[in-house]
Image: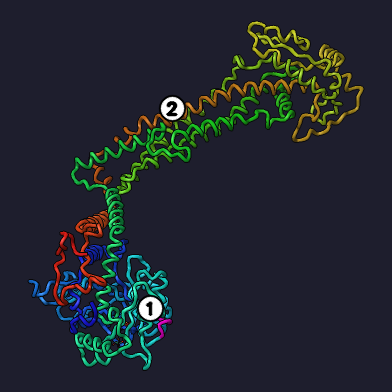
Amino acid sequence: MSVDDLPPSSASAVTPLGSSVIPIVNKLQDIFAQLGSQSTIALPQVAVVGSQSSGKSSVLEALVGRDFLPRGNDICTRRPLRLQLVQTKPSSDGGSDEEWGEFLHHDPVRRIYDFSEIRREIEAETNRVSGENKGVSDIPIGLKIFSPNVLDISLVDLPGITKVPVGDQPSDIEARIRTMILTYIKEPSCLILAVSPANTDLANSDALQIAGNADPDGHRTIGVITKLDIMDRGTDARNHLLGKTIPLRLGYVGVVNRSQEDILMNRSIKDALVAEEKFFRSRPVYSGLTDRLGVPQLAKKLNQVLVQHIKALLPSLKSRINNALFATAKEYESYGDITESRGGQGALLLSFITKYCEAYSSTLEGKSKEMSTSELSGGARILYIFQSVFVKSLEEVDPCEDLTADDIRTAIQNATGPRSALFVPDVPFEVLVRRQISRLLDPSLQCARFIFDELVKISHQCMMKELQRFPVLQKRMDEVIGNFLREGLEPSQAMIRDLIEMEMDYINTSHPNFIGGTKAVEQAMQTVKSSRIPHPVARPRDTVEPERTASSGSQIKTRSFLGRQANGIITDQAVPTAADAERPAPAGSTSWSGFSSIFRGSDGQAAAKNNLLNKPFSETTQEVYQNLSTIYLKEPPTILKSSETHSEQESVEIEITKLLLKSYYDIVRKNVEDLVPKAIMHFLVNYTKRELHNVFIEKLYRENLIEELLKEPDELAIKRKRTQETLRILQQANRTLDELPLEAESVERGYKIGSEAKHEELPGTRRSRTETNGNGRLHM
Ligand SMILES: Nc1nc2c(ncn2[C@@H]2O[C@H](COP(=O)(O)OP(=O)(O)OP(=O)(O)O)[C@@H](O)[C@H]2O)c(=O)[nH]1
């Protein structure tokens, strides 16, 4: 088919062309237009781009065959115009020749038959959003044109690229318009109609430059060269049209639109099309290019490319719609059903409580379906806290770590009181061991606290997604379980305190694992001996125990260990030999009877003491007072400390104390390591697991509370409604696509290319869309 074959009057010349795919995309566009800016599905469309006043609107008008767009030398298109051309049946085909437009922003949608009213509405709607002073907005205007003289095409007329801001335009107007254009044309589903005026250098065409950015391979760009009639004398656009200047895969079409003068003189589009045709006929330079000249050819090409483009996109479009449908259905599901009956609400509440408690138990027991594989969770974390945090920390504690030899000696001396250290009683051991046991309390309480924190964490994990729509219930459940866990923490901590107090209250030196005094003495002696500490040279003890200082040199020899008998009588006993130590303790004595030691002064001291004691008091004192002058004592220092040095005997005593301390501490530590986790499990973890359901029922499952608990926030209701609407639209879109068989063979193409065109039916006649070829197939 050539331009010469076309009837001279209008775009209706190509009306037989058509396809069932464009109406489907148009339908989809309508469907998705309901979603407004929320629609994320890019549908196939044609965007018209070019610099300002390049003739974009003129091309669109020519395609429609009617004047309906604001045009002029100034900026006219200031908002994207989504234009759907819908072919209607002509009167000859049982339809009507009426043409009308419908704006999508009109509610209810109404038909506008007067096309100058359509133009005024576009101007008013543009002003409404973009202001009256040349402002630009990216919010599109939706317009449908119904006519028997148009081809089914969806186009978007975009604001022209401008360089210098005018009126209310911001200083970065060029960048803004470019960004706006790019948002449309960057979508692979968008065909680009790049309009360049022939009277400017094509190499500088803004349209081709921006199209090249979005479609570097030129797969989806059609070049349109306007204003061929006003090129410089002696120049022509032949090379441009042949793609020799800037090649484009889809090629170029040259057009001649009405000039501004034509518009002012009210020249009709029909006349303009005739003039265009004449123009090309009269220019021999354009001979042989008829397939790429004139508005009717442009319409045909556009339709043809669009149909192919849509066919190529349909499968992916279908899968995108399907994916969106699936995601939206899931989202809708997450908002749950609305239950209004009291019984239904009660059942819903009960099911939430039950599900929550099941989730809590199964997380603790390690049976949760959503168990992580990347980190420990639930019950496993509790075990970790018990074993790797609590027990491990206790095992690392050395009971003698913060006890120096001096501390122990001071404790021994303090325990002997004013009695000049005749014995090393069991008191220091008990005092020291109690002190060490008390240190176990804090980590044990902390362990309970850690487990409590874990349970709180678990309780948050158990909050099901469905509960998100009931913030009141979620909050109340959170409060209830929080309080309940705290209630469980108290008895577990009380039990821990009791356990530690029990351990401190009775030092069970009969414990089978306790080292016992005899063994301790023996080991201590060996340790001290083997360490071969040189005999310390006793320095006079500064002001602390003067009388002990005097005798310290002989103390080691004279001191001996005494066993303490059950009747409290201290038997004078030499330092036990190893054989003695092996011997069982006398009946009724404590197991550490060998521990106590006696500190005896030298024999001379003892005798002097005895002498003094034997003489009558008055006699003695009188003698003394008569013979001696007054002796003044040095004031004792405020803080008294035991001497820094200690004898071998003292070393043995210290060693014994340490051995006993360690041995007994080990027993207590084992008990605590065993019993504290048990107490926590019993009073906190298992108790809450067992009782949680009952507590929820008691606190929440109340007739008067149900309505309040199951109150949804308003925004959720809005979201549900919106998602429901999206779902409906996507379902509609899906159904629409189902109407179309996806196999390319079965999709009607509605036009013929190349040699086929020669046999094309007569212009002006319409072919039914469902007409089939001889094979019973739809025309391809
Ligand atoms: N002589 C002649 N004038 C044309 C042709 N195409 C458009 N014009 C004129 O150029 C001016 C701009 O045309 P429009 O169609 O408004 O251009 P536009 O690209 O839509 O402009 P904006 O939307 O403002 O960017 C108008 O006065 C048209 O009459 C043509 O092929 N030949």
Disc 1 residue lies near ligand 1 with CB under 8 A:
no
Q: Which image quadrant is residue 646 in?
A: top right
Q: Which image quadrant is residue 281 in?
A: bottom left
- Indicate the secondary structure of the residue bearing disc 1: loop
The quadrant where ligand 1 appears is: bottom left
Q: Which residue is mark 2?
A: 682
From the viewer's perspective, is 740 left or right of 547?
left
Residue 705 position (above or below residue 511): below
Q: Residue at x 44, y 33 (%)?
A: 379
- Spot occupied by residue 566 in the image (x, y as percentages of width and height): 65, 9
Residue 450 position (above or below residue 257): above
Q: Which residue is mark 1?
A: 243
Q: Which residues are magenta?
A: 201-205
Asked whether residue 202 is drawn in magenta, I would say yes
The kind of residue tagged 1 is Gly
- Spot occupied by residue 295 in the image (x, y as percentages of width and height): 25, 80
From the viewer's perspective, is 91 left or right of 519?
left
- Indicate the secondary structure of the residue bearing disc 2: helix
Q: Of label 2 and label 1, which has the lower sequence position?
A: 1
Q: Main secondary structure of the magenta part?
A: helix
Residue 338 position (above or below residue 500): below
Q: Do labels 2 and 1 touch, CB within 8 Å?
A: no
Query: Which quadrant is home to the N terminus?
Result: bottom left
Q: Residue at x 70, y 14 (%)?
A: 519
Q: Residue at x 87, y 14 (%)?
A: 604
**Distance (Cα) linking label 2 and label 1:** 86 Å
Tag of residue 511: none
